[in-house]
Image: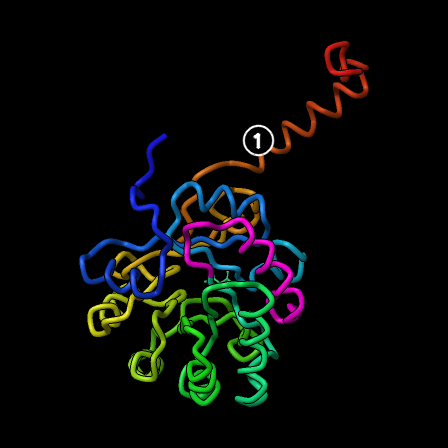
């Protein structure tokens, strides 16, 4: 099967910027383990995000807050071992950078050293400027994340669309410019009005990756379990399902159970 990616060279932060310059959209998807990361990389994904959404889809938590630095490192190093081409981004988990900038750089260094990832992603704007600058000064590329930032869910109180009001939209625009000025190589914009995301994408020269932010951004990101239809219970408007793995896996498991119970499995050819 052919892919949209004929270029097998490793994706770098520099190449993402070139993609934006020539108007080529950037594909990004989450992965948390070796086997899925290997499939996604071989399919031609540009960026693989080891998201702290692992907290929800891997660990079964309601929010991303419980995720620890050690857990992110475990997922990150599993993914990195599988990936040959995609840029690998690892999320900095809640509590690993908000305390102070010294703690932030120590956390980012652990992620880079212990996973072998290419860069980190961090949620927030002006309020974490010092932490981002310190991480950048250690030579670690940083992807920003604005709009709906799930680690702040207890402050927001809801997962509804952010920056619909003028004041919040203005703050988001200001934060996006700030992140570009201090040296972030890209920004994720989550669940904000499409027009606002398009405006930010046009104003900034670094690639803007959207999730629930319309078609005017430089690329798109989704959570792998959602787009493959493993999670049936999560159906936000922005989600497009590309497979129904929930049904495929359920039917396969039920067929196996039946074959075991009826003594059909294993047959003579399946034994020694
Ligand atoms: O953790 C994650 O999966 C993310 C994406 C939703 C962008 O941050």
Relative horizontal placement of residue 263, taking residue 174 as reference (left or right): right
Measuring 43% from the left and 84% from the top, which residue is drawn there? 137
Measuring 75% from the left and 25% from the top, which residue is drawn there? 257
Mark 1 element type: helix
Measuring 50% from the left and 67% from the top, which residue is drawn there? 159
In the image, the residue with mark 1 has its CB under 8 Å from the nearest atom of ligand 1: no
Relative horizontal placement of residue 71, taking residue 206 as reference (left or right): right
Q: Is residue 80 magenta?
A: yes
Residue 65 vertical position relative to residue 223 in the rendered view, above or below = below
Span of residues in magenta: 62-88
Is disc 1 surrounded by few (<14), some (14 to 19) or many (20+) residues within 10 Å?
few
**Where's the C terminus, which quadrant?**
top right
**Residue 6 drawn at (x, y percent):** 29, 42
Measuring 19% from the left and 62% from the top, which residue is drawn there? 21
Q: Nearer the viewer, residue 272 or 173?
A: 272
Residue 156 vertical position relative to residue 159 in the rendered view, above or below = below
Residue 263 vertical position relative to residue 36 in the rendered view, above or below = above
**Residue 183 drawn at (x, y percent):** 34, 80
């Amino acid at each position: 099967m052919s892919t949209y990616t004929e270029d097998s060279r490793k994706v770098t932060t520099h190449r993402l910027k070139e993609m934006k310059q020539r108007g080529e959209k950037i594909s990004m998807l989450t992965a948390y383990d070796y086997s899925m990361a290997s499939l996604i990389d071989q399919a031609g994904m540009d960026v693989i995000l080891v998201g702290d959404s692992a907290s929800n889809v891997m660990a079964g938590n309601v929010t991303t807050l419980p995720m620890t630095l050690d857990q992110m490192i475990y997922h990150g190093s599993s993914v990195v071992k599988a990936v040959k081409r995609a840029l690998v981004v690892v999320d900095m988990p809640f509590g690993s950078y908000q305390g102070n900038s010294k703690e932030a750089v120590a956390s980012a260094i652990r992620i880079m050293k212990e996973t072998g990832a290419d860069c980190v992603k961090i949620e927030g704007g002006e309020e974490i400027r010092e932490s981002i600058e310190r991480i950048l000064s250690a030579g670690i590329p940083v992807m920003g994340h604005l709009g709906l930032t799930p680690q702040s869910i207890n402050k927001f109180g809801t997962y509804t669309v952010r920056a619909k009001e003028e004041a919040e939209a203005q703050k988001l625009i200001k934060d996006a410019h700030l992140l570009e000025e201090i040296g972030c190589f890209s920004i994720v914009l989550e669940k904000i009005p499409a027009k606002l995301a398009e405006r930010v994408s046009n104003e900034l020269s670094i690639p803007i990756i959207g999730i629930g932010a319309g078609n005017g951004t430089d690329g798109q990101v989704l959570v792998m379990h959602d787009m493959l239809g493993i999670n049936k219970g999560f159906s936000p408007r922005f989600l497009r399902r590309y497979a129904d793995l929930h049904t495929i896996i359920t039917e396969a498991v039920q067929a196996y159970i039946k074959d075991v119970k009826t003594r059909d499995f294993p047959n003579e050819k399946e034994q020694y």
